């Protein structure tokens, strides 16, 4: 395995995520293409490889840990990542969880182009909807969003797209009003680099 692969493996392992060779290969290609496209299209703010791996790849996988800890049945289910950007958290979740039907919803055409290219490059199967989430009429079993915008505007939109669960990654931002007024529950992230972060979640139907 290359030194890049080894360093990736170490970073993921230190955070509690143990990857097989195929997962490492896909994350390595993802990182390589993200850095290459980023020089022209500015897809992410971070330029350092380790920062990108931690802040985007590993942070995305905190949702996988959340699913596991809450006993969410994601296998074979449809998951929509709303406002996916350069693929976060959806693509890392697909690489890690494998048995997931993934749809990425993104309104930026340059980011959609990257996501379509990435799909072929890493050999993953997912669908890209290039447009506004408000215009999507399909329902998904799990709907997730990361750094999408003001919670009060985002939550109703995500719930409209969901047939079962909604997850909103809010970092270290948490307001009691969100729990009281919108009925969300809090999952506290215990992954080492993200302790103190929160994922808000809600079961929209039973």
Image (cartoon, grey):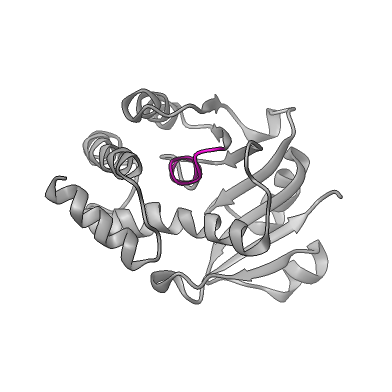
- Residue that extends furthest to the front in the rendered view of this protein: 20
Left or right of residue 89, residue 20 in this image: left
Q: Quadrant of the N terminus?
A: top left
Foreground pick, 148 / 34: 34
Foreground pick, 15 / 149: 15
The answer to whether residue 2 is seen in the rendering is yes
Q: How would you classify the magenta stretch by its main secondary structure? A: helix
Q: Eyeballing the image, is 55 above or below 105?
A: below
Q: Is residue 197 located in the magenta-colored stretch of the structure?
A: no
Residue 181 location, quadrant? bottom right
The answer to whether residue 48 is seen in the rendering is no
State the image coordinates of residue 28 (x, y, percent, origin top left). 26, 42
State the image coordinates of residue 91 (x, y, percent, origin top left). 45, 40
- What residue is rendered at 64% in x and 45% in y? 74
Q: Is residue 92 located in the magenta-colored stretch of the structure?
A: yes
Residue 92 location, quadrant? top left
Q: Eyeballing the image, is 13 above or below 118?
A: below
- Residue that extends furthest to the left in the rendered view of this protein: 3
- Residue that extends furthest to the right in the rendered view of this protein: 206
- What residue is rendered at 34% in x and 47% in y? 20
State the image coordinates of residue 196 (x, y, percent, origin top left). 50, 76
Q: Which residues are magenta?
A: 90-99
């Amino acid at each position: 395995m290359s030194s890049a692969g080894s360093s990736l493996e170490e970073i993921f392992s230190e955070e509690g995520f143990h990857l097989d060779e195929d997962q490492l290969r896909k994350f390595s290609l993802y990182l390589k293409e993200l850095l290459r496209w980023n020089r022209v299209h500015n897809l992410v703010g971070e330029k350092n490889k380790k920062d990108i791996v931690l802040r985007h790849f590993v942070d995305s996988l905190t949702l996988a840990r959340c699913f596991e800890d809450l006993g969410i049945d994601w296998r074979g289910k449809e998951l929509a990542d709303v406002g996916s950007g350069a693929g976060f958290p959806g693509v890392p979740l697909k690489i890690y969880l494998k048995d997931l039907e993934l749809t990425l919803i993104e309104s930026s055409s340059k980011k959609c182009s990257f996501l379509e290219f990435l799909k072929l490059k890493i050999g993953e199967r997912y669908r890209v909807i290039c447009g506004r989430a408000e215009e999507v009429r399909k329902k998904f079993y799990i709907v997730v969003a990361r750094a999408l915008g003001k919670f009060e505007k985002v939550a109703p939109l995500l719930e409209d797209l969901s047939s079962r669960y909604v997850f909103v990654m809010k970092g270290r931002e948490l307001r009691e009003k969100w729990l009281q007024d919108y009925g969300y529950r809090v999952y506290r992230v215990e992954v080492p680099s993200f302790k103190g972060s929160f994922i808000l979640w809600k079961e929209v139907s039973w």
